[in-house]
Amino acid sequence: MYPPPAEFASRAHVGSLEAYGELYRRAAEHPEEFWAEMAAREVHWFEQWNHAFEWHPPFVKWFVGAKTNASYNCLDRHLAGRGSKPAIIFEGEPGDERIWTYRELHGHVCRFANVLKSRGYKAGDRAIIYMPMVPEAVVAMLACARLGITHSVVFGGFSAEALKARIQDLDAHLVLTADGGWRRGREVRLKEAADEALADCPGVRDVIVLKRTGGTVEMKQGRDLWWHELEAGAEAECPAEPLDSEHPLFVLYTSGTTGKPKGILHTTGGYLTYVTCTMKWVFDLKEEDVFWCTADIGWVTGHSYLVYGPLSAGATCVMYEGAPDHPGWDRWWGIVERHRVTNFYTSPTAIRALIKQGEELPARHDLSSLRLLGTVGEPINPAAWEWYHRVIGKGRCPIVDTWWQTETGGILIAPMPGAVPLKPGSGTLPMPGIEAEVVDFHGKPAPPNTEGFLVIKRPWPSMLRTIWGDPQRYEQQYFSRIPGIYFTGDAARRDEDGYFWILGRVDDVMNVSGHRLSTMEVESVLVRHPAVAEAAVVGKPHEITGQAVCCFITLKQGFEPGDGLAKDLRQWVAHEIGAFARPEEIRFAETLPKTRSGKIMRRLLREIVTSRTVTGDVTTLEDLGVVARLAAQEDED
Ligand code: WT7
């Protein structure tokens, strides 16, 4: 156990276990009052609510009847006191740097919002943002939010296919993109991918293109417009639209258990309240802090803890465009040193990759500005935790291991660093108002140290509201296993101190480098390849990325297994979904193990890639021999 350092606790927003317990108790006993108080304190409202929340399972509304605006909360309300405070400290991969104060960011957002307005966009419209990690991506998000245009950011690593599916599902008429971005010294050609996607998206009227890399792009007459040309002619004042608290702020697509990604909908007032609260509770944000979350804005972590949370809380945020190993593996430590970063938030995968590079790289940099470290996205193994604590935090910095999901909008389980003693590998205790529990199949609480399903028993302000266009899937996915209770899809156990230990997914979802990926999604891509008859995909334990994609393939008549074809298939998945989904391993099989009803037995395949031996019940198998052959193949490798 690592108790909070006394010096840290004495200055923390929540400085003792008792203070945490008191907050937790108040939120549990009087949720309406508690959240009304938090909302009034942390967010600016143009009009007050009638009720803190209305819960008609599985649907919830927060701060019903109130009006607010996320862009106003992230910008305008800071102008008086923080106008000349840096809002964004940006470093591009080639080494270019920009520092924008709150006043400057406000100016850019207003001008760009006026651009959107002049093109006829307004509250209720939808925009796709497919951009590199540059400050204009934040401008795009906040300009949309300012007018009530619901945005959906698509991670720049996603392929044209993935982009197309999202544009179509959202029926977006507006796409904001760039010529490209920099990654490991190479240009990621975003506009090119967008053009490929847009060939099948006749509904898109405007494509606004930021010039970032200066690479050549084709501009389609009557559809494509240059960002800088439009912005140059725009007015610098644009009032934020007072929007309903439940106005859709953004949709973010995430993998589910089928081939089709789910559009997770987040709304405005509750989301802002919750992410702003957690900036203090989890990150203990102080006025003078320099906050750096390394996540891309294309993931929920980037939304909540690079944009909306920190900016709403008035923080100075660091934003970095490129790869952690460019030009060398100490790039991040150089950034920490140059900008005096105080709070640093990253993924266990990144930490494990950095561990491999040795201790001497961080030792070359002055990391003494750091006071708090965080992790997110996957369980962290205690060895990686200890390294992070000792080598990066010099034994001084608490580590907040934050458990949450795209659906939860904000961090639900994490230590309050001035209050809660840490145990490496545990997310520790839930936030106030979060009634997390580990239950069995029937929803009964599991005894201490017993594995079960992680559920959340009451709604919280930043909870997803629905799946875009598919309320039935929303109910079925999250509220049907145990009626009326939010089902996270994670297995967990609680120890004798009530600490949560997350054990991984209970469904067919993989977690690769802290990014969620559905086995079915990869399978459905593979079977579209001309050589593939059948595919079964499982996550395989991986030293750095936590899990890696492992594919079992049967081929159509006339195709032969081989290294060339394996390479082709890897490339195919990368092309169809994105490079981050590229399979680690392709294994050819004569047949796949199936139940008598024809379902692929992924459990068996998982066991093969995990333990090399197969145990448990295999009597429902169609072909027992196949399992033995696959297991044997492993030994030959
Ligand atoms: C899944 C959510 C939340 C932002 C990044 C991922 C896993 C997340 C932790 C953690 C153990 C974690 C869970 C969860 N996960 N954080 N601290 N410890 N597991 O968002 O893509 O929506 O994935 O990531 O399995 O369900 P996401």
Image (cartoon, helix red, strand yellow):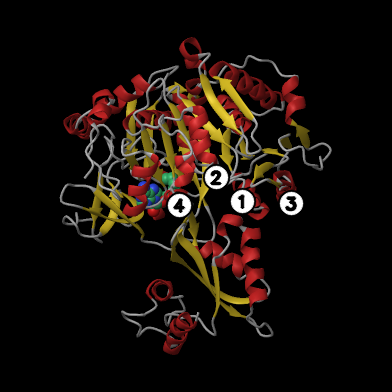
> In this picture, is 274 found above or below 552?
above
Please give the name of the residue rendered at 58% of the width and 19% of the height, measured from the top-left corner: 106
Dot 1 or dot 2: first in sequence order is 1
- Measuring from the top left, give residue 494's x and y in whole percent: 22, 52
Please give the name of the residue rendered at 47% of the width and 34% of the height, measured from the top-left corner: 292
Residue type at numbered disc 1: Phe
Residue type at numbered disc 2: Pro
Q: Are marks 1 and 3 in contact (CB under 8 Å)?
A: no
| Residue annotated with mark 2 | 324
Q: Secondary structure at mark 4?
A: helix
Please state, as top left, top right, bottom left or bottom right, where the N terminus lies in the image: top left
Dot 1 or dot 3: first in sequence order is 1
- Gap in angstroms between the C-alphas marked 4 and 1: 19 Å
Numbered disc in front, either 1 or 2: 2
- Measuring from the top left, give residue 66's x and y in whole percent: 41, 23
Residue type at numbered disc 3: Glu
Determine which of the numbered discs, if any, sits on residue 158 in the image. Answer: 1
> In this picture, is 596 found above or below 43?
below
Please give the name of the residue rendered at 48% of the width and 30% of the height, measured from the top-left corner: 308
Determine which of the numbered discs, if any, sits on residue 205 in the image. Answer: none
